[in-house]
Amino acid sequence: MNRNLWLMAAAQGLFLTNNVLFVAVNGLVGLSLAPQTWMATLPILGYVVGGAISTGPVASSQARWGRKASFQIGVAVAFVSTLLATYAVIDRNFWLLIVATVIAGYYQANGQLYRFAAAELAKPEYRERAVSLVLAGGIVGGVLGPNLAQWTQHLGNAPFAGAYAALAVIALIAMVVISMVTFPPVPPRKHGTSGGRPLSVIMRQPVFIVSTAAAALGYGVMNILMAASPIAMQVCGHPFRDAALVLEWHVIGMFAPGFFTGHLIKRFGVIAILSAGVVLNLLCIAIALTGVDVMHFLIAMFLVGVGWNFLFTAGTALSLKAYQPEEKDKVQGAINFCVFVVMMITSFSSGALVTTQGWTLLNYISLIPIALTGIAVLWYVMLDPTRKPA
C-alpha cells in the first residue's frame, strides 16, 4: 500500500457511505412517499439507472481529462444530488426524490471505477492486492453509512432528511481526499490512432464474458437482497435500528475480506475464489429461508456480502486480462454498464417482489443469478481444462 492507495481506500469508504446510506433509507422513504407500495424501491432503482446512463459520459470524461478530474466531477454531482434529495424529502415529493437519485447515479458510475484506478496505482505484480485492499476501504461505509442513517434519522422536520443532508458533507470530504491523489498522467493521443480493438471483439472473449458475469450477477444477488432487507424487516416488525445493524454487518461482509481476498487470489487462483463466492451465496439463501429473526437476516446478509466480495474482486482481477491499456476506458465502461443493467433489474424487482410476494419467494428467485454465475465459471474451466488458475 502506497500513499495514493490509502487515499483511494478512503475515497472508496466515503463512496460506500453514500451508497449504503442510500440503500438503507431510499426504500423506506420511498415506502412512505410512493403512491403505491410496489414503487417503494424506485428511488433505489433511480440511483442504479443514473449509474447506467452515466457509464458512457464517465468513460469519456476519464479518457479526455483523466482520473482525478473525472472523479472530482463525480463527487461534485454527489454534493448537488444529496441537497436535492434533502429538499425532496422535506417537500414530500416522491418524484423529485427519484430525480435526485438518478442524478446521484453519476457518482455511482464514477465510484465503480475506483477499483480499476487502484490497479494503476500499484506495480503489475500487486494489482490484484491493490484492487482488493482499496475495496476494503468500503468497510468505512459499512460502519458509517447505517449508523449515520440512524443518528440523523430524526433530524429536521422530515424523517431521514438529515441523513441526505449529512451525505452532502461526506461529498465535500471526498472531494478533498480525491484532490490529494496523484494519478498517472493521461497518455497523449496521437492523431489518427485507434483505441485498440473494437469493443464487440473484446466482449466476445471468454475472459470478458466470465469476469463480467461474475461481477454483474454477483452484484445482482447482493442488490436484490440488500435493497429488500430493510423493507422485509419492517414488515416482520423489526425496528429500523435492527435493519441498520443488519446492513452494517452486510457491508462489513462485503469489504472486510478485502484485506485478504487479494492474497487468496494469488495463492489459489481466480477460479477458486469465484467458486467460493457462488457457494457463499447459496449458504446465504439457505440461512434466509430458515427464519425471519434478526439473526437470520444478519447472518444471511453477512454471507452474501462476503460472497459478493469474492465474486466482484476476482471478477475484476480476471477482467484485467481482457484488454490492453489503450482499451481500458471503453472496456471498463462496458463492464460497469453490464453491472448497472443487472442492478436495474434487481432494484426494481426487489421492491415489487418483497412487497407483493414476500421475502421467501425473493430468496428462491435469487437462486437464478447464482446458478448462472456457477455455470459461467464452469464453462470457463471446461474451455481449457489444462489452463492454470488465472
Image (cartoon, rainbow, N blue to C red):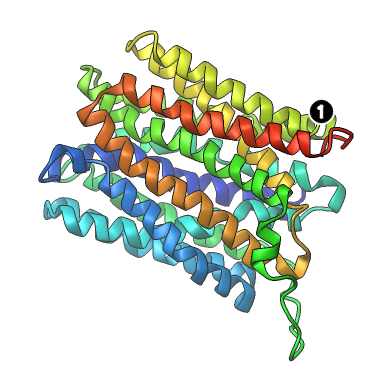
Residue for badge 1: 268
Identify which residue is drawn at 35% across, 14% down.
294
| Closer to us: 359 or 209 | 209
Residue 51 sits above or below residue 15 on the image: below
Q: Position of residue 133 (x, y in %)?
A: 69, 40
Position of 263 with respect to 173 (left or right) is right
**Relative horizontal placement of residue 57, taking residue 348 as reference (left or right):** right
Of residues 119 and 153, the one drawn nearer to the viewer in this rendering: 119
The residue shown at (66%, 58%) is 203
The spot of residue 318 in percent (x, y) is 73, 45
Residue ID at (50%, 22%): 302
Of the 4 image quadrants, the one containing the C terminus is top right
Q: How many marks?
A: 1
- Image coordinates for residue 121, horizontal then vertical, percent: 75, 57
Could you tell me if residue 82 is visible in this image?
Answer: no
The three-letter amino acid code for the residue at tag 1 is Phe
Residue 348 image position (x, y, % from top left): 31, 43
Query: Residue at the spot x=78%, y=48% of the render?
Result: 127
* Residue at the extreme top of the image, as rendered: 290
Quadrant, the N terminus: top right
Q: Quadrant of residue 139?
A: top right
Q: Nearer the viewer, residue 248 or 264?
A: 264
How many neighbours does mark 1 have within 10 angstroms: few (below 14), some (14-19), or many (20 or more)?
few
Residue 310 visible in the current orientation: yes
- At mark 1, the secondary structure is helix
Q: Is residue 378 above or below residue 294?
A: below
Vertical relation: 87 (above or below) 276: below
Q: Residue furthest bottom?
A: 191
